[in-house]
Image (cartoon, rainbow, N blue to C red):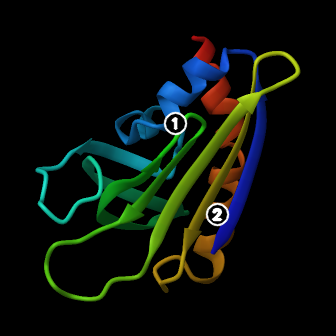
Amino acid sequence: MHRTITAEITASPERVFEIVSDLETYSEWLDLVTISEPAPADSTDPGPAWFVTIRAKVGPFARSKRLRMVRTELTDSTARFERHELDGREHSAWVMASKVDEGRAGASVSMELSYDGGLMDGPIEKILGGVVDGAGDKLSDYATG
């Protein structure tokens, strides 16, 4: 799965970047993320770490996955988070990357979400895509509320 979300948000680019560069805020505006909390640091982490629970629901069925994510890139306008588990096993990659620029009436945001595993196959991926596609409006509400 790979999705790119773009949105124009009336909040300042600084405010929006403050939000997208802190994974702990994602559960407030990205329905895909139900829990996000700081995780203990490890010497191999390139940045701060969080435990994140990802959840998708189709009717009475739900799939969820708990991930350990770290911020792997932070510039003036870009924040990137990648899965970084500490159990020594290989895991499917999860990546969330955001770029915030000056927009027409505030901030312009481009966010990429990608996952290369099989948890969200078929119908769940379609539902997941709908949840992700609505994130721009929720981010705007969160940034301006």
**Direction from residue 82 to residue 95 in the image, left or right:** right
Vertical order, 3 against 18 (above or below): below
Which type of secondary structure does the marked residue at label 1 adopt? helix
Q: Earlier in the sequence, mark 1 or mark 2?
A: 1
Q: Which mark is residue 20?
A: 1
- Picture quarter with the N terminus: bottom right
On the image, the x and y values in percent for residue 15 come to 56, 18
**Direction from residue 113 to residue 36 in the image, left or right:** left
Q: Determine crowd level at label 1: few under 14, some 14-19, many 20+ residues with C-alpha closer than 10 A.
A: many
Instruction: Report the Cα–Cα distance between label 1 and label 2.
Output: 23 Å
Which type of secondary structure does the marked residue at label 2 adopt? helix
Residue 12 is drawn in which quadrant?
top right
Q: State the residue lying farthest toward the front.
A: 75
Most foreground residue, 143 or 46: 46
Q: Which mark is residue 89?
A: none
Nearer the observer: mark 1 or 2; the answer is 1
Task: Return the residue at label 2.
Answer: 127
- The kind of residue tagged 1 is Val
On the image, the x and y values in percent for residue 21 come to 46, 37
Q: Residue at x 50, y 52 (%)?
A: 32
Residue 10 shows in this picture: yes
Vertical order, 108 against 43 (above or below): above
Q: State the residue lying farthest toward the top.
A: 145
Q: Determine crowd level at label 2: few under 14, some 14-19, many 20+ residues with C-alpha closer than 10 A.
A: some
Q: Residue at x 63, y 31 (%)?
A: 138
Residue 142 shows in this picture: no
On the image, the x and y values in percent for residue 55 come to 43, 59
Residue 86 is drawn in which quadrant?
bottom left
